[in-house]
Image: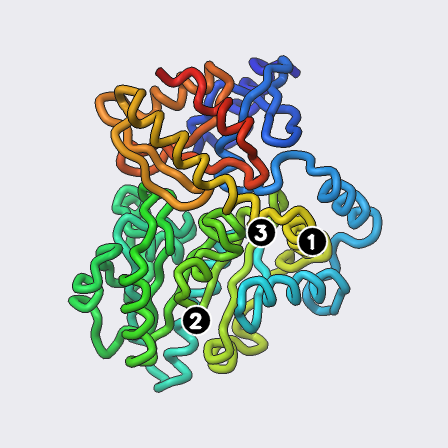
Amino acid sequence: MNTEVIKEKTEAYALHTYNRFPVAFTEGKGVYLYDAEGNKYLDFAAGIAVMGLGHAHPVFTAAMQDQVGKLIHTSNLYYHDTIAEAAEKLIKASGMNKVFFTNSGTEAIEGAIKAARKYAWMKDGSTDHEIIAMRRSFHGRSLGALSVTGNDHYQEPFKPLIGGIRFADFNDIESVKAVLNEKTIAVLLEPVQGEGGVFPAEEAFLKELREICDEKDILLVFDEIQCGMGRCGEMFAWQKYGVKPDILTSAKALGCGFPVGAFLLNEKAAEKTLVPGDHGTTYGGNPLACRAVSTVFDIFEKEDVIGHVQKLTPYLEKTLDKLVEEVPCFAARRGMGFLQGIVVEGEAVGNVIQNALKEGLLVISAEGNVLRLAPPLVAGATEIDAMAVGWA
């Protein structure tokens, strides 16, 4: 099928909840995608920070093909070898104690919310506890995840959402203190806000949050669905800050293209939250998903993906800073590691993205007229140089 046929069939049969760009991809290799006509695109979106290893990584591909021929699904009524392997590797990499595998990042957030509420109920049997979330945040599209997403644009058509949520300002500890009370049981935030405009947390902000949570027996919950799995220069962003959460969520590059997520608990949270019957999933943690996770960690270690991101980040930032100096509508850069944002002024960011697409470059947007770049973690200097061509 050519692009027009693919577009026509999609619009005819798929619910129109996405305003898709006028391109239809049929193949990927490394940091490039190819459309139905064979045109080549440099992928600095990585499927919204998902394709950490790029497209069609040979080791990952071979592992998934092998697992499909062995075992895909059994349900969580039974043990299987790949969940044992994936859980061990994820726990060791994250520094947490227990993991629950989900099908998506949104489901990971739902699990984190349930774990926090169960922790509160175990303390005093009350169901009126509150969670503090951040304005400008994004945590997913389900009702629970929307409830802690600090953006009215996403929430308004779907109210009433779940109750017991208060919002504070990111990087403003006094704002957090202003809504903190005796009912607060958790503080939920992204260490680096992605969809909200690519805002990294300030180290002092996270450290003071940790102190407050420790003092008041409040759970600190980090959403690392986008900023985790090497994207910020450590396996998880909390390791870069040195501020460890009680609950951690992961997805996107956790499966590098295979749909899988997870929420992880430290020892305190694991001992006093979910027990058999509290939470479940039919597909979550199935053999195929867990083989994907396990293989991702193997490749990260063998190819030193984290070291590569650390080495290339200064070059990426220097290149983007030069673009800010040279491109009239680029006003400022901010970000961390391979998650970067450029503030666009005097031009709609959508137009900038469309122009980049015409030049064979894929980039995405974030709130606040921000151009977001989230390339595969394996992108090198050659690809960074190619990205920088054609903006002026």
Under mark 1, the amino acid is Asp
**Percent coordinates x, y for residue 75 in the rendering:** 70, 62
Under mark 2, the amino acid is Asp
What residue is shown at x 33% (from left), y 78% (from top)?
Answer: 214
Find the distance from the CA under tag 2 to the CA under tag 3: 19 Å
Find the distance from the CA under tag 2 to the CA under tag 1: 26 Å
Q: Secondary structure at mark 3?
A: helix
Q: Is residue 135 above or below residue 125?
A: above
What residue is shown at x 83% (from left), y 47% (from top)?
Answer: 69
Q: Which residue is mark 1?
A: 298
Q: Secondary structure at mark 2?
A: loop
**Percent coordinates x, y for residue 336 in the rendering:** 40, 46
Front-lying residue, 167 or 191: 191
Front-lying residue, 48 or 77: 48
Q: Secondary structure at mark 1?
A: helix
Under mark 3, the amino acid is Leu
Mark 3 or 1, nearer chain start = 3
Mark 2 or 3, nearer chain start = 2
Front-lying residue, 51 or 314: 314
Q: How many other residues sit within 10 Å of disc 1, few (<14), some (14-19) or many (≥20)?
A: some
Q: How many other residues sit within 10 Å of disc 2, few (<14), some (14-19) or many (≥20)?
A: many
Mark 2 or 1, nearer chain start = 2
Front position among marks 3 and 1? 1
Q: Which residue is mark 2?
A: 246
Q: Is residue 277 above or below residue 76?
A: below
Number of numbered discs on residues: 3
Q: Is residue 378 above or below residue 358?
A: below
Front-lying residue, 25 or 130: 25
State which quadrant residue 26 falls in: top right
Q: Which residue is mark 3?
A: 254
